Image (cartoon, grey):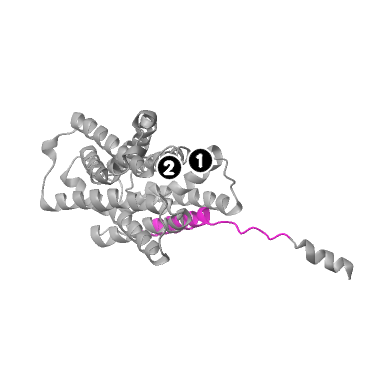
């Protein structure tokens, strides 16, 4: 069912989305000293899927598990195993704000993938955005080589963005056969369970420190960032607000850096600020739509010819 929202409600939903996805990064950084990364990633995504399950069950006929099992499995592998798994490991190697900035190159990668697999045209704004975005990554990476930033952390951030981009493209290609609520619910359940299985074999449950602060962060991320964030994202997509969400995506790494400075005391270096501005500008260009040039009115030309 397509939902229609008032402009005020749409703005409120988008504001909620960018806020919770922005604060997710420093909160994840704060949680990692209390838990191994894979177990934490599996817990938060599995809990998020369980929270969404009662909502999805109201649309049970749309599940079509037998015909869509392969699609659900691949989405879980890319969007949960790859995106959440790699980011939870990688954020331990970089400042949270910087890591989120690199991951949110995903819209730029999405522009490339859309051209390759969906046949979407790359206009001059998107091409300029791609060039500016990769230049921003280069600036940040070169700055990291001079300081204490980890090349492995940068690689994991870019790999996380790659998985998210591929998962988004696949979701778009399979959109006609997949129910969006079931797609996000099942991929969270499958991916979360897989991450917990891998984490149980490589990490120790006894290493989790179940302090009140850790439990609070885990529940906040599971409820608001994963279950609430992804549900609102797909409600906006169903309402035809793709361009609205895309236009505000660049705010997420900006907010993440702001929250990281406030909550974690991270420093805003000149190299990071320059690279951040370049990436933010690139994402804005990629999401900008080229205004078509209006065709001349034939009637007016005929009138002039007759005078």
The span picked out in magenta is 269-295
For residue 208, what is the image quadrant? top left
Instruction: Give the foreground label among 2 and 1.
Output: 2
Could you say where residue 257 lies in the image, as x and y percent from the top left?
A: 33, 58
Q: Is residue 178 above or below residue 130?
A: above
For residue 275, what is the image quadrant? bottom left
State whether the magenta stretch is mostly helix, strand or loop.
helix
Could you say where residue 268 lies in the image, as x and y percent from the top left?
A: 34, 60
Residue projecting furthest to the bottom: 307
Which disc number belongs to residue 168?
2
Count of labels in the image: 2
Could you say where residue 115 lies in the image, as x and y percent from the top left?
A: 55, 42
Q: Is residue 180 above or below residue 252?
A: above
Could you say where residue 16 lies in the image, as x and y percent from the top left?
A: 32, 60
Observer able to see residue 197: yes
Specify the quadrant that holds the C terminus: bottom right
The residue that disc 1 covers is: 113
Question: In what element is the residue under mark 1?
Answer: helix
- The question of residue 297 being in magenta is answered with no
Q: Are marks 2 and 1 in contact (CB under 8 Å)?
A: yes
What whole-number distance in Å separates the C-alpha atoms at marks 2 and 1?
Answer: 10 Å
| Residue at the image point whose x is 28% and y is 57% from the top | 260
Q: Is residue 119 above or below residue 302?
A: above
Observer able to see residue 152: no
Density class for disc 1 (Cα within 10 Å; few <14, some 14-19, many ≥20) is some
- The question of residue 276 being in magenta is answered with yes
For residue 35, what is the image quadrant? top left
């Amino acid at each position: 069912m397509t939902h229609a929202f008032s402009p005020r409600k749409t703005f409120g939903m988008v504001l909620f989305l960018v806020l919770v996805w922005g604060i997710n990064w420093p909160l994840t950084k704060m949680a990692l000293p209390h838990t191994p990364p894979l177990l934490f990633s599996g817990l938060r995504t599995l809990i998020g899927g369980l929270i969404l399950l009662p909502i999805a069950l109201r649309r049970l006929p749309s599940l079509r598990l037998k015909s869509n099992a392969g699609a659900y499995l691949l989405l879980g592998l890319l969007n949960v195993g790859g995106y959440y798994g790699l980011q939870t490991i990688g954020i331990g190697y970089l400042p949270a704000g910087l890591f989120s900035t690199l991951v949110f190159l995903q819209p730029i990668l999405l522009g490339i993938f859309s051209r390759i697999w969906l046949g979407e045209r790359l206009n001059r704004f998107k091409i300029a955005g791609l060039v500016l975005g990769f230049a921003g990554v280069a600036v940040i990476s070169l700055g990291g080589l001079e300081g204490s930033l980890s090349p492995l952390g940068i690689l994991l951030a870019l790999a996380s963005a790659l998985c998210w981009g591929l998962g988004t493209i696949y979701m778009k290609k399979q959109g006609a056969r997949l129910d969006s609520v079931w797609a996000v619910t099942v991929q969270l359940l499958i991916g979360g369970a897989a991450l917990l299985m891998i984490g149980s074999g490589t990490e120790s449950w006894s290493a989790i420190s179940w302090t009140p602060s850790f439990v609070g962060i885990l529940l906040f991320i599971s409820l608001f960032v994963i279950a609430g964030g992804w549900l609102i994202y797909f409600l906006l997509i169903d309402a035809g607000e793709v361009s609205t969400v895309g236009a505000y995506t660049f705010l997420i790494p900006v907010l993440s850096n702001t929250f990281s400075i406030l909550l974690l005391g991270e420093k805003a270096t000149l190299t990071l600020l320059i690279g951040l501005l370049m990436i933010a500008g690139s994402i804005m260009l990629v999401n900008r739509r080229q205004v078509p040039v209006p065709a001349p009115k034939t009637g007016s030309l005929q009138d002039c010819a007759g005078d």
